[in-house]
Amino acid sequence: MQNALHAAACDFERNGRRPTITDVAREAGVSPSTVSHVFSRRRPTSAQTDARVHAVAEALGYRPSLTAQTLVTGRSRLIALVVPDLLNPFYASVAGGVEEAAAEAGLSVIIGNTDMRAEKEDHLVGVLEARGVDGIVFITDVRARQPALERLARRGTPIVTLDEEVEGGFHLVAVDNEGGSRQVAEHLIARGHRRLGVVAGPAGLPTTRARLRGFRAGLGAGLLPSSRIVYADDRLEGGRRAARGLLGGRDRPTALFATNDLMALGAVAAARELRLGVPQEVSIVGFDDIPFAALADPPLTTVAQPAAALGRVAATMLLDAMRTPDEPAMRVQLPVELVVRASTAPVPADRSTEDS
Amino acid sequence: MQNALHAAACDFERNGRRPTITDVAREAGVSPSTVSHVFSRRRPTSAQTDARVHAVAEALGYRPSLTAQTLVTGRSRLIALVVPDLLNPFYASVAGGVEEAAAEAGLSVIIGNTDMRAEKEDHLVGVLEARGVDGIVFITDVRARQPALERLARRGTPIVTLDEEVEGGFHLVAVDNEGGSRQVAEHLIARGHRRLGVVAGPAGLPTTRARLRGFRAGLGAGLLPSSRIVYADDRLEGGRRAARGLLGGRDRPTALFATNDLMALGAVAAARELRLGVPQEVSIVGFDDIPFAALADPPLTTVAQPAAALGRVAATMLLDAMRTPDEPAMRVQLPVELVVRASTAPVPADRSTEDS
DNA sequence: TTGAAAGCGCTAACAG
DNA sequence: CTGTTAGCGCTTTCAA
């Protein structure tokens, strides 16, 4: 028998065919269902059988096909993560958290990077449906994809959104965008800043809106004319350009709030180009607390959000929802924290009363 | 018939079952194989049939199950990307490139983040095999996973490695790590630096070794005692700590080469903590040219590699290999380029002859 | 231009 | 404790 087994093993080596459960069953002298049970441990098997099956499987290099398992069980052990921009360290951290929690639970993660392009998002949702993913963490424009996503949700695929509250049975993991931004405003106001500017992300993003709202709320009335809000693509270059506009003209703001760190770092670069000292001549605040925020020069004052934890929580919510389908949508809020670093300072004495 | 169709559609709405090809066939009054052919276009169908099938599919919200297709065709249209650290913008860019090229070709990407942990890598390889991925871009310790990966390769799963030449039929996409590092050495030597230090990544990484080799080659003999090479975890904190060691002692180097940008930025932070001017008192060079390199203060001199292109090329090689299985392993090398920015300067006059 | 039938690799009753 | 059997949803001959 050893010889037969060896021969079979060599055969698989040679012709490159993956062994199946039937191959293992035959070589081990048991039925396929027994092999199945040896691997799944869903019903007891004798120690002997166990050992023989494992030995044969090992020799042939057998692994149960997840594809076949998926077809019969209806569970793919596969979740998807859809992000707008993997190059943003914040989303990369979220992705890391999702992957980690998923891997611990034995799930694989399909990643989709949309660059916020509508066709890509549409296409992606279709593919994920066709693949039968067990759940989706969707961190882009949920509202625009709502019909398709709702159909998925109705058919039992849990969906977690980030920071975007929408009807339709989606789970939500969020941070207090408004509260964090309000703290930014209060921080600046307390340091005497009265002429503020905002480098805002895309106007369509729920986070952009929430952060603007919070910032406004913390300022009090009349301090933020819309001419001092510039919307930008929410990456480095976008922030740089927007800040150039805000800082280049007359009556430049004494402080800038960028709705994410990438844009804030872009704004710092813009200030440097314009030979404006940060924070001596202009204070700059970001949002996210990406790893570079602390290392930038000057270190960036920003609102820290627990990116990896957001990802982990999102994945965990998916796991919960997969276990208990008919539960209502969950919502979790994680804390943010204003981290004051050197990019903000009191407004210079000679400019403190120039403007309103 | 409209009514029957509507009723069926409502039924799927209600009970959440996904319609199958059989459902569509029944409602459209054709056979399942016809529906299959309407979608795959692998044999002609009459315009009438076509229209009716599509209408029914639309009404029921039908999408062919990729799982079932995978089972029968043996192709999953799924590739995997295994990276050591998604939080490193370099790998995030590579991932972006892979995802983009894959999506264009209609493939999905499973992502695995290993943190360089052996068990995770082992586990991952097993899962990818079980999932029947059509190809793998493996950017971590290939050598350590070689037996398992080779078995996969023998069974027809193409595998692309990055910067790591190994036997066993793996495809390779690489950059000229040695050449780039040699240029760094020459750049520093030309500016009078003679006391150099290296903040090196993990000694086991092929890139670390290649970059050290190239740097040494460019220096000439005797300029880099091993006491001036500090190995570190290849992230920000690792670079910071390593640089603190190198710069904190007596006879500190006038220039530091870090084998990636993350560590180089950590080194800049360390220099700042020690109140050493960069580049006045110490020049610092990195490798990768991540987006922050240009924005750091001072902007970082570094060796640029085309990260997104590496990813795109890797994915494209996979696609090629999937089409033409029995072709020999491909190797592609992409160019690097030394980008001189403000973090390097000539060695200060008062220190230029202190050492060797 | 279409349909019938077999089967991809596995699980899950049901029987023993 | 183990085997038999009937599918999961699809593609693909083969036959018409």
Image: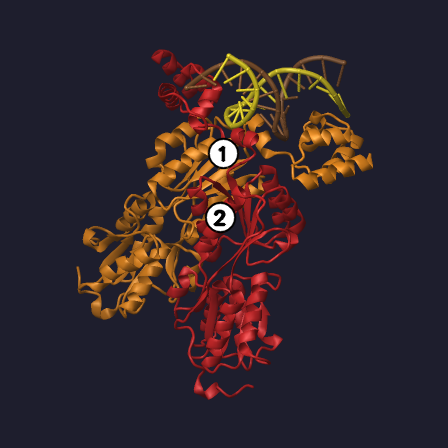
Chain colours: A orange, B red, C brown, D yellow
Name the amino acid type tagged 2: Ala
Residue underneath mark 1: A133
Image quadrant occupied by the C terminus of chain A: bottom left
Left or right: residue A340 compared with residue B156: left
Look at the numbered disc 2 and give the secondary structure of its residue.
helix
Residue A65, disc:
none
- Have a look at marks 1 and 2 and say if they share a chain: no
Q: Position of residue B197 (x, y in %)?
A: 54, 75
Name the amino acid type tagged 1: Val
Q: Residue at x 44, y 35 (%)?
A: A127
Q: Chain of mark 2?
A: B
Look at the numbered disc 1 and give the secondary structure of its residue.
loop
Residue underneath mark 2: B315
Question: Is residue B232 in sight in this rendering?
Answer: no
Of tags 1 and 2, the one toward the viewer is: 2
Question: Is residue A109 in sight in this rendering?
Answer: yes
- Neighbor class of circle 1 (other Cα within 10 Å; few <14, some 14-19, many 20+) is many
Residue A334 quadrant: top left
Left or right: residue A249 compared with residue B65: left
Q: Chain of mark 1?
A: A
Asked whether A217 or A255 is in front, the reply is A255
Estimate the spatial distance between the alpha carbons at disc 1 and disc 2, rounded to whole Å. 22 Å
Q: Residue at x 41, y 35 (%)?
A: A125
Asked whether A2 or B325 is in front, the reply is B325
Q: Position of residue B297 (x, y in %)?
A: 39, 69
Left or right: residue A15 compared with residue D7: right
